[in-house]
Amino acid sequence: MDDRNRHIRERAYEIWESKGRPEGRQDEDWYEAESQIGSNEPKEEAGIEAAHKYEREERKFEQSGQVARKAEEARRAIDGPEAEMLKRAEQAGKDRAQIKR
């Protein structure tokens, strides 16, 4: 199997998993992967660069000493007056996820 077909197969599998592993849609997922790879190969390099940039920014944030402060802010939000609103938002997200399945 050549590299392009292997890449398509791997992308089709990712697509299938992202859709919740539905049965009987392997051709559709394959064509979608084939289309993405055929037209988006230059974008893949940009995606890799974006991932590297994200990792650099994440390390920079971690080294800034702000992690503990932001974690404390999040804990206060979860335990504080916003807790009920956050629980409702979480439930709404879960409900939407169930509808999409």
Image (cartoon, rainbow, N blue to C red):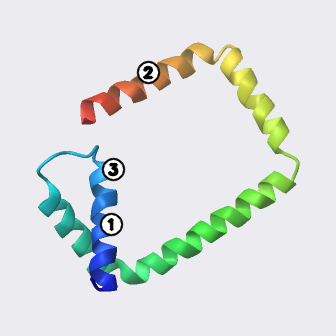
Task: Name the residue located 13 percent from the left edge and 63 percent from the top edge.
Answer: 27
User: Relative to residue 41, is residue 84 drawn left or right?
Assistant: right
**Is 87 rendered above or below residue 33?**
above
Residue in front for this viewpoint, 49 or 21:
21
Image point (71%, 30%), residue name: 74
Q: Amino acid at mark 1?
A: Arg
Report the Cα–Cα distance between label 3 and label 1.
10 Å
Q: Amino acid at mark 2?
A: Gln
Q: Nearer the viewer, mark 2 or mark 1?
A: 1
Q: Position of residue 31 (x, y in %)?
A: 17, 69
State the residue position of label 2: 91
Location of the N terminus by quadrant is: bottom left
Q: Which residue is mark 1?
A: 11
> Horizontally, is 28 left or right of 2 in the view?
left
* Label ID, residue 18: 3
How far apart are the two marked residues, 2 and 3, measured between alpha carbons? 21 Å
